[in-house]
Image (cartoon, rainbow, N blue to C red):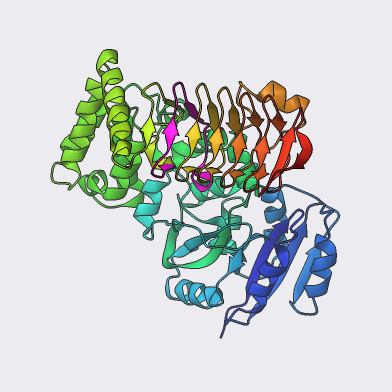
């Protein structure tokens, strides 16, 4: 007999992605399911869209009038659910058609597993597949080890046994980390697994709940606190030690890691040495040891003498010791920059030696410079902190000329077209919080980090500021001391603060 599955979907303003999510449920090859949706106060047409699907096209029920956060609404959905198997999906993600079929078959064959996830493929707001794959470990022990450093269960991909969730107290309302909190409590008593293949398209976009929390720098603190609150039953370490470990501030991390390995040996089984030498435990341990904790790093290395990365780890440790000498560190940085400048001379691109590249190390992989460019003295390129899915590129097409004392502040990608000329004392920014331009950005109401695109053959005079989100068309001209905060069409001349159209130029 087929097991019936209940989809659990908490939602708050799920448009415009919700229809794709619901369509991916309708398209499942496994047909024995129903849908429960908990609306948390949507105002964007979500309820109207849901009414088109449930219950006429998708059997199930919509709950309204009792808004919660994600954890609270999932708790209520678990309570309302009548089936043992429950599948999660968020209102902006998309299921593979065979998802339920494969997960139900696995859980039926493995009654010891309470949580089953899968790999996921990242997509952007337009549905384009992104790299890399959302890769998670598959075996229970590797999942336990990886939970030391990060959440390694893709929440939208899971199918779980309702009875197990209820036994450990159900979801809790802990914003942004309600899933991690559940795993840390659940894995003490139940087995976890992830399928090797991806079964969900996981959408990463600027308005996503997790992405907002990461951008606001809340997620790491919430995750660390969640870990330390749950560390004693799962990993056998006290809250204060767990917090130091997760913040990479423990003065002797290897002592706590040894204690964790012994605790897992007693509670999860297996040998102590096998855990200490497993790739997943080593990887998590490396992520938790402060780089300056040389003794812990050497101790971990000594346990794993035969690992392929032994010599690389040893070189990294020696490099840390060497770089503690400030003069030597400065010399290495200068050598790398000098080599980078020299390599560009081979393609007839001249970069003045006074260039400064700030914010990331090494920065060169994010900067793409074509042949025949010329950058004058005191060019400053500043990269703001960014997340992996935001990885910005700074691109200079062939023949770009840049005057002296120019600032380029990068948070989103910036591209500068071929044969474009940029005068002295200019600023181009895709990062509105940069201290050098934030006050001016407020005055002209330019308040969004966004890519900048400058077309071919553009002429930018001296002391021009170009703000985030601006697109400048081919052959445009911007006169001196202008502030550009809106798009400029091709072959137009603009000037002023803020810049406005003056006239057309000959093509």
**Residue 181: quadrant of the picture:** top right
Residue 153 in the image, given as x and y percentages of width and height: 49, 55
- 353 versus 10 height, above or below: above
The residue under the point 56% across, 77% down is 97
Q: Nearer the viewer, residue 13 or 65?
A: 13
Residue 206 in the image, given as x and y percentages of width and height: 64, 47
Q: Which residues are magenta?
A: 368-391
- 479 versus 425 height, above or below: below
Q: Is residue 148 visible?
A: no
Residue lying at the far bottom of the rendered structure: 1
Residue lying at the far front of the rendered structure: 506
The question of residue 377 being in magenta is answered with yes
Residue 299 in the image, given as x and y percentages of width and height: 20, 31
Q: Nearer the viewer, residue 422 or 413?
A: 422
Q: Is residue 169 visible?
A: yes
The residue under the point 19% across, 33% down is 315
- Image side of residue 475 versus residue 318, left or right: right
Q: Nearer the viewer, residue 408 or 23?
A: 408
Q: Nearer the viewer, residue 104 or 328?
A: 328
The residue under the point 82% across, 56% down is 44
**Residue 427: quadrant of the picture:** top right
Residue 334 in the image, given as x and y percentages of width and height: 30, 23
The question of residue 65 being in magenta is answered with no
- Image side of residue 282 versus residue 4, left or right: left
């Amino acid at each position: 007999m087929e097991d019936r599955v209940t989809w659990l979907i908490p939602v708050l303003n799920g448009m415009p992605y919700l229809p794709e999510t619901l369509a991916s449920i309708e398209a499942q090859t496994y047909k024995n399911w129903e849908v429960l949706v908990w609306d948390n106060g949507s105002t964007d047409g979500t309820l109207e869209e849901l009414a088109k699907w449930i219950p006429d096209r998708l059997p199930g029920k919509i709950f309204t009038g009792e808004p919660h956060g994600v954890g609270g609404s999932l708790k209520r959905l678990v309570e309302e659910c009548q089936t043992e198997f429950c599948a999660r999906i968020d209102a902006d993600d998309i299921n593979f058609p065979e998802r339920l079929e494969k997960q139900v078959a696995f859980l039926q064959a493995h009654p010891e597993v309470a949580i089953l996830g899968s790999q996921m493929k990242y997509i952007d707001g337009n549905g384009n597949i992104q790299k890399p794959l959302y890769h998670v470990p598959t075996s229970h022990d590797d999942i336990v080890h990886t939970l030391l450093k990060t959440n390694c269960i893709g929440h939208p991909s899971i199918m779980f046994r309702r009875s197990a969730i209820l036994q450990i107290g159900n979801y809790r309302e802990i914003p942004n980390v309600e899933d991690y909190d559940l795993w840390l409590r659940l894995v003490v008593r139940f087995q976890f697994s992830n399928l090797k293949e991806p079964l969900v398209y996981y959408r990463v976009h600027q308005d996503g709940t997790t992405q907002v929390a990461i951008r606001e720098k809340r997620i790491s603190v919430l995750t660390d606190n969640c870990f330390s609150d749950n560390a004693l039953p799962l990993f056998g370490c006290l809250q204060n030690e767990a917090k130091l470990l997760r913040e990479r501030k423990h003065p002797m991390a290897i002592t706590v890691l040894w204690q964790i390995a012994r605790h897992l040996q007693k509670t999860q089984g297996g040998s102590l040495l096998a855990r200490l030498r497993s790739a997943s435990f080593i990887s998590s341990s490396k992520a938790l040891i402060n780089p300056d904790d040389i003794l812990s790093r050497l101790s971990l290395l000594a346990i794993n003498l035969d690992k392929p990365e032994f010599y690389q780890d040893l070189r990294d440790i020696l490099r840390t010791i060497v770089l503690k000498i400030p003069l030597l560190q400065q010399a290495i940085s200068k050598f790398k920059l000098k080599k980078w400048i020299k390599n560009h001379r081979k393609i007839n691109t001249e970069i003045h030696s006074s260039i400064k590249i700030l914010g990331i190390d090494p920065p060169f992989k994010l900067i793409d410079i074509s042949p025949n460019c010329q950058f004058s003295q005191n060019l400053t390129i500043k990269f703001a902190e960014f997340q992996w899915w935001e990885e910005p590129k700074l691109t200079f097409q062939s023949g770009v000329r840049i005057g002296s004392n120019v600032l380029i502040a990068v948070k989103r990608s910036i591209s500068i077209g071929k044969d474009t000329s940029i005068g002295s004392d200019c600023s181009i920014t895709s990062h509105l919080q940069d201290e050098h331009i934030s006050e001016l950005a407020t005055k002209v109401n330019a308040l969004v980090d966004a890519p900048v695109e400058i077309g071919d053959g553009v002429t930018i005079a001296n002391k021009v500021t170009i703000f985030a989100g601006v697109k400048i068309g081919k052959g445009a001209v911007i006169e001196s001391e202008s502030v550009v905060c809106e798009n400029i069409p091709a072959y137009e001349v603009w000037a002023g603060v803020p810049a406005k159209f003056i006239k057309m130029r000959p093509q």
